[in-house]
Image (cartoon, rainbow, N blue to C red):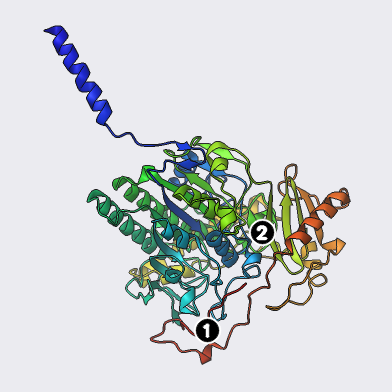
Amino acid sequence: MKKILLTFFAVLVACQLATTKRPVRRKKGNRLSRHVRPNFLFILADDLGYNDVSWHNPEVPMPTLDRLAKEGVIMESHYTNPVCSPSRAAFLTGKYPFRTGRQEKIIMPFQPTGLSLNVTTLPQELLKLGYQTHMAGKWHLGFCANEYLPTRRGFQTFLGIYNGAADYYSHTRMSGKYHDFFDGERPAREYKNKHSSIVYGDRAVEIINDIGEKKRKRSKDDKPFFMYLAFQNPHTVLQPTLRSFKRIKTTVNQMRDVYTALVLDMDFAVQNVMRALKKNKLYENTIIVFTSDNGGSIKEGASNWPLRGNKNTLFEGGTRVPTFVHAPHLLKNPSYVNERLMHMVDWMPTFLNLAGFKGNPSLKLDLDGIDQWNTISKNISVRTEMVYNINHNVGAIRMGDYKIIFGLSGREWCCEYLVVAPWLRWIHSIPGVSERKKQIYKEHYTMLWERSKLRFERDHPSNVTGRNEEIQSDEDLYEQTTVSSVGTLNEVQLPVFNSSAVYLFNLRTDPNEQENIRDKHPEIVEQLKARVLGYFKLVVPEDGPPEVDETKLQSIDGVIPLNWCQAKFRE
């Protein structure tokens, strides 16, 4: 009898093991299992500096993002373009902006341009592979023609702003003149007085809950998803929620405190999104990427320390951004710091390969990006060279350890500033708080800041300043002499390498770009200059027409004027 029972239980256990579904966690070669394609959640901060994250600076409170970073892979050498629209174009096209005409500046509200229609985008390609695609947040790649809108460039849903900035509460721009907040292509006024970070987070949660419901019902619409969550935080205008601001440790730098509260607002939103992923059993099969569109703007409270430079410069502080990949159930080696070279253009081929793209997307789609999954998951180097940017007489590239900058690199802003300007004006924009309470908050924090200022003056008497001061560095001195006239749509100018405007750095020994070694290594300068000239064969003219007269455009019910230009196909 005992033998019969033992045999029965052995058979029972064997049957149970045979019928139990085992989650596929590892990949074959450079792809995940063909049977379970991953979801992609790409979280983009706006103007977040290198020193504005907790894994570089413990004084920055971001508990959710900190945990995700430390449980994932921190990409310490992740680069992007030095300013907003070019970076977003690089991410969504897998091409350097100088190949799409987006290499110069941001797209201004009344510029008749947008992301060229001849360029295929990441969400368009993912749709072909059976993915669902969603976006919440800041677009900033054109809206003057309907063809430029995110819902025409591959996103099935969109909620957010078309321009580069807006009031976090009223969702208007130009001092409230124009409404800039859309659900799909419909002006969405129902979100007025609700902080944009909360709105974007709530939309992400809503979509995830809907996906989870379809998954539970085994609906035919149950498809893997790509979600692009592009926060405004912590871009100016600095308007955090009162909830976050109350949790910030008050320092002598008022503006920095307000900025840090905006970072915490973003963290709260991400926390809710993570809870939704886990609740709907989507977390284990989702690859989460967090990064910034460019370096921080120090004059707006950010910090890129110890890196040199600022947003809108080609120095490391403008282009090397805090980044991590969180996918502990899909990564071969989670929880480590990765020093391998990676650029924003690499995400498109990386995601496409993981999604099941047939063939090499970099070759088939003529991309500049490289599939970096082995770099992320196995710490295998695949990129040794990259372009920071090339535009007329200005640019920078890196080959191996060496980086060359030529021409105008942009203005530098010094260090972190002691700011004693009145940075409490944002309190008056908070809805649902009485004027009496706002005044109490203002008086309270003014008192705390004054006490901090007195302590700082006592301990650092030579470092106190009443305003941000622009540093007249050598970059500013050559600004007037090395830049030729701006090219047109039919003209691409070759660079003129004025020796006073050339910088050469060894980033392995000098990551903070303190010593210009161009005179010590002229042979390396010549090698990199030749490579720059090679890239110029691929440069397309800048697509930066002047803004039109807004008074000639029609605004319906106070909405930012839409569909007033001709969309462009660029060869």
Instruction: Sort mark 2 into few (<14), some (14-19) or many (20+) by Cα contacts within 10 Å.
Output: some
Residue 464's label in the rendered image is 2
Q: Which residue, given by chain and number where applicable, does mark 1 sit on?
A: 565
The furthest residue to the left:
1
Q: Where the C terminus falls, by quadrant?
A: bottom right
The residue closer to the viewer here, 155 or 175, is 155
Give the CA distance from mark 1 to mark 2: 49 Å
In this rendering, which labeled residue sits more in front, label 1 or label 2? 1
Nearer the observer, 302 or 93 = 93
Q: Residue 223 location in percent, x, y?
A: 34, 53
Residue at position x 85%, y 64% in the image: 498
* Horizontal side, residue 460 vs residue 519: left or right: left
Q: Is residue 231 visible?
A: no
Instruction: Tell which of 191 and 163 is nearer to you.
Output: 163
Is the N terminus in the top left, top right, bottom left or bottom right quadrant?
A: top left
Left/right placement of residue 480 relative to residue 190 reads right
**Residue, far top:** 2
In the rendered view, tell whether residue 59 sits above or below residue 186: above
| Residue 262 circle label | none
Q: Mark 2 or mark 1, which is nearer the start of the sequence?
A: 2
Question: Which residue type carries mark 2?
Answer: Val
